[in-house]
Amino acid sequence: MSLSLPDPVSAYFKISNGENITHIVRVFSQDAVVVDDGQTHQGHGAIESWRREARKKFEYTVEPVSASQEGGRLTVTANVVGNFPGRPVQLDHVFSLEGDKIKSLEIG
């Protein structure tokens, strides 16, 4: 299924699926916050490290299947398939954007 997503969100999913991880700084604001699996990652360095560690631990793909907007938050539901415990899983990715950058992302 092909969804029409804002450019930084679309780029985030491409990076999540293996595109050059150094591009992460292009889609997140400098002081962005990501909350995933009970942990908070703030700033470009921490967010890039979080993505690198996830890729080291597991092989997976993330496929957005639906999106909804409420207020300033965009919720993208995605199927995540890979070699991690509890797979496959469907996760909500809740984005807040600031201009053309992701300001915050909560995954759960």
Image (spheres, rainbow, N blue to C red):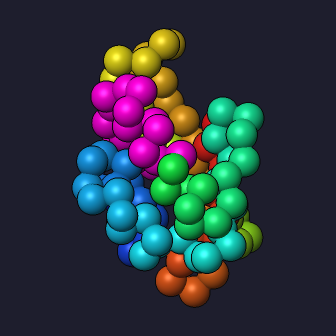
Residue at the spot x=56%, y=66% of the render? Answer: 44
Residue 12 in the image: state x and y as whole percent: 41, 60
Total count of labels = 0
User: Position of 46 compared to 59: left or right?
Assistant: right
Where 70 sits versus 90, above or below? below
Where 17 sits versus 72, above or below? above
Indicate the quadrant where residue 10 lies. bottom left
User: Position of 54 compared to 21: left or right?
Assistant: right
Q: Quadrant of the C terminus?
A: top right
Residue at the spot x=47%, y=38% of the render? Answer: 53
Residue at the spot x=35%, y=18% of the render? Answer: 83
- Examine the rendering and report whether any part of residue 46 can be seen: yes
Residue 78 in the image: state x and y as whole percent: 45, 41
In the image, residue 59 lies in the stretch drawn in magenta? yes
Indicate the quadrant where residue 62 lies. top left
Between 89 and 25, the one nearer to me in the picture: 25
User: Position of 61 compared to 34: left or right?
Assistant: left
What residue span does the magenta drawing correspond to?
50-66
In the image, residue 108 lies in the stretch drawn in magenta? no
Residue at the spot x=53%, y=46% of the render? Answer: 50
Where 88 sits versus 16, above or below? above
Residue 27 in the image: state x and y as whole percent: 46, 72
